[in-house]
Image (cartoon, coloured by chain):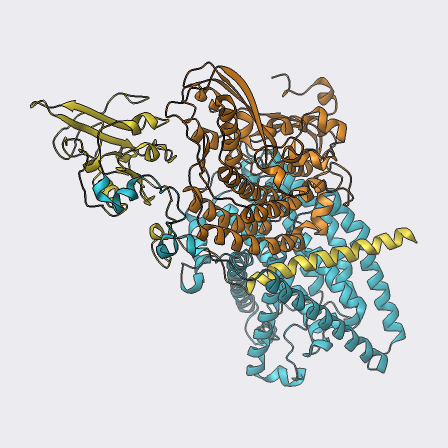
Chain colours: A yellow, B cyan, C orange
Amino acid sequence: MGALRDYFAAIGRTIVTLGDGLAVTFSYLLRKPCTIQYPDRTPEPVVSMLPERSRGFLEADVEVCTGCKLCESACPIDCIHVEIAKDESGQRMIQRFEIDLSKCMFCGLCVEACPAGGLRHSHEFEGGMGDVRHLYVSFLDEPVPPAKKGKTVEPKPLGSIIRARLARPFDPYRGDRPASGARAPLSRGGEP
Amino acid sequence: MDALYELITGSDLGFWWKQLLLAVLIGAVGVIVFSVALVYAALMTYLERRVSGRVQSRVGPNRVGPLGLLQWLADGAKMILKEDVIPAAADRPLFRLAPYPVVIGVFAAFASVPFGEWLIAADLNVGLLYLLAITSLVVVGILMAGWASNNKWSLFGGIRSAAQIVSYEVPTALAILVVVLMAGSLSTQDIIREQGGWPWDWYVFRQPFAFAAFFLYFTAALAEGNRTPFDLPEAESELVAGYNTEYSGMRFGGFYLGEFGNVYLMCAIATLVFFGGWQIPGVSPAEHHGSWLWQIVGFGLFFVKAWAASFVVVWLRWTLPRLRVDQLMSLCYRYLVPLSFVCLLGTAVLMMLVPAGSLFDSLLRFGTFGFGLLVAAIFFWRVLWHIRHVGDRIDLKILARGVRGRFDPAIQHRAYGAFRKQQKQPEESR
Amino acid sequence: MSETSPTSADRARDAILLNMGPQHPSTHGVLRFVLHTDGEIMHRAVPEVGYLHRGLEKLAEQQTWAAYMPFTDRINYMESMFCNQAWAMAVERLAGIEVPERAEFLRVIACELNRIANHHITLGCMSMDVGAFTPFTYLLRERETINDLMEALCGNRLTYNYMRIGGVAHDVDRAWIAALEKFLDHFEPICDELDSLISYNEILVKRFIEVGVICQADAVAWGLVGPNLRASGVSWDLRRDQPYSVYPRFDFDVPTAAGARGIEGDCFRRWLVRAEEMRQSCRILRQAIAALPEGEIRAKVPRKLKPPAGEVYACVEGARGELGVYAVSDGSDRPYRAKWRSSSFSALSIIEHISPGLMIADLVAVVASLDTIAPEMDR
């Protein structure tokens, strides 16, 4: 008799537990789906829905850069290249300020290191490029002098700098830099 | 079909003319049945994807056509255009041949499905037997595919499939036999005519044993159609994709059409055997027979019932885990087969003891129907309970940038980087 | 290599040599098993690891102490927060840095959220590997909310890099706490829903019960930790038994699922332990929110951190159990050596021991229930 009871108890348990599971899944037919239909059917662009601290592509405002190179040394994977050199008139100039976004791991250590606040994470994340080398971004068109103490700069909207740069990619390996100062990148890490 | 057949054979044309016309007729009917089956199988993929989406609180395909209704066309075009890869080590002729028995086995069965009183390609007097027998062709194709792929995972899938389908034929047939016993006919149309339009006239609610037989049939048919929780031949997390691991392009599409066609077929059988087929409530068969209007309504009813059953199959698939091979076999031989026999015997005894139309007969009928309603009521109460208990999706928009006003800088000990400090107090920047 | 080739005994039994992975849907990452099977039943399953070796321990020697933090995220992407904490604790102990109280609370909050997120994936994968796909999507949906919270807290959804030597990177505000409370209110009923949907589903129970049994002695001998060890009946939790951070201030249970259906150490117990741990994490989170003190979130740490020469072992109770790091300093600004003790590796090593007699479908369930993560094994 015990065996028979177990037999029917097993059937009963199966029906009850399976039925309860079916009730859960059925209840979802009556609720709103949680899909966010990225990218074209969101209430607003996803970039503007991200939280304050969201770490997207790095962007550098060279107008406030003091040329201290702390970001370069803070970067664990050496994807920031800053070069300071004197020009013909003997003035210190920021010659290069380049970030290899294809290497960047978005850890945010450089942003914390920057004393001037010239480096920040934008919320941009859509950087699909035909060539990975186009993610090598230069933030300088021509050498600029480092910012002095007390210099005031109009703050630029978040993401505007990197958007402009990515829209106009340059290929560091072919050397077709858009403006003056065309040079091959520093040979660091695994680059040729 | 029958009318046309009699028209041709009864006419005073010559023998060969008659044969030619018959051949054309059979060919035309074959093409129609094939296209109907194709479209139904393709629609099944749409239902599958859409329901699975909604069940998983997703949306499902909604881009191709209104509500994504043309998704199946896009999928089909993709399948046809894809490269048909044949592995180097495969048994080429068998590999090429394998999808055909699957497709033929399922699509040929559509010939005997009564979509409406007039809408049946071949009203065989052994219709149910034909339906059960021809679908067994599927296992040949699956076994062939498993063997010809020359891949161990595929072989496992094929072997599992053979064991499973052969075993589950038994309870399927036994459960249907309950109804055959009650109807006294194997013809699909006769079985439908024996039932009535109202739910309590359906065979499923005639008496408790038929009610149980329906669930037995449904479970066993799920296993025969390789559907979750019995989708072991293609268990994606164990056997990669089982017997169709190596298939691509339209050959893969063939297996899928076969599988989805099989789901519809099994639901159509459930509809005609247990749910009254095309019978309309309150319309007698005599009224039904002559009227175009009732024919269309009847077709619609069959359509709705069969697709509702298909919905249940899909819904089950997206809820339940998969059994193990040994559990699959023990379920079949320890539970389904003995219980089907019990149902069969019980039905026979009831038919002996309870004359049709007696008070006890009605009592059984309405009692079973009431029990079914009760189960449904409990189920929907549970659904509502779940919705109330968990509530809808939560919304954490307050974290997004969009509503920046709610961010309280006074609590913010340290801004992210110093950039915003500089934004707030530009005179402090160096 | 002799491990993977069939033995003479296998040949005698006509064993099929079956390659499961490195590309297989249920090996979760790049992991390979060599199965010696007789039809569905296995004689032996030999795990092969190393496909995801990235040299993360060696990388530590090239980085400064602080700059290694983002790399710890990558050791185990499912429990980045715990790796962060283990590394931070190791360096803090080496350098003798006192962590502010608020930072410790924030660490606990972040870690417990991470634990819930990790168990979402584990339970989801377990159910997916036995064929139920929907629980996985429900749990991923909940995990998405945690990801949103994490992104608001530290800026990233997977590789958090939230902790720093001597504290944490960012503070929380009232809005974030409110959002967390909202999530907890929402999530606790979801645990019940999960139970209704799948935990006690008879098919799932039948698939997990008495499968892949690891007895208490074996579990200890093979060095299992965390939920796997607790499911075998050993009530051992570093948060309680070897307290660190501010865990002694919280009141929580260490579930062992004793008395449930099945037997000690089977897959079903491992499921139940994890399901219960999510509830306990919610309890800890609620207490932590209530008791969150005001104050600094980061101790004063010199920019060029040079811990005195020495060695240290720091471990935390990660989502998979003890996650330890052994760090050696030679007094310079870079680690001399860092060695991680990962739970996945020991969990995987027991598979060969328990595999004889399992079915192929069982192996999948056992691997999922042991919650192994390929990158953590190989590092």
- Which percent across, then down, holds residue B1? 58, 71
Residue C4, compared with residue A3, is above or below; it is above
Q: Is residue C190 visible?
A: yes
Along the viewing direction, whichever of B56 and C175 lies nearer the viewer = C175
Residue in the picture at 28% in, 35% down: A135
Residue in the picture at 62% in, 42% down: C250
Q: Is residue B318 visible?
A: no
Count of numbered badges drawn on the protein:
0
Q: Residue furthest right?
A: A1
Residue C212, compared with residue C308, is above or below; it is below
Q: Is residue B227 left or right of residue B25?
A: right
Along the viewing direction, whichever of C213 and B125 lies nearer the viewer = C213
Q: Is residue C170 left or right of residue A84?
A: right
Residue B421, compared with residue C357, is above or below; it is below
Q: Residue furthest left?
A: A89
- Which percent across, then down, holds residue B88? 51, 31
Q: Is residue C151 left or right of residue B228?
A: left
Tell me which corner region of the image, top left, top right, bottom left or bottom right, holds residue B104.
bottom right
Residue C182, compared with residue B279, is above or below; it is above
- Which percent across, then down, holds residue B430? 22, 35
Q: Is residue C55 left or right of residue B195?
A: left
Instruction: Pick the quarter of the image with the N terminus of chain C.
Output: top right
- Which percent across, then down, holds residue A27? 59, 63
Along the viewing direction, whichever of B67 and B35 lies nearer the viewer = B67
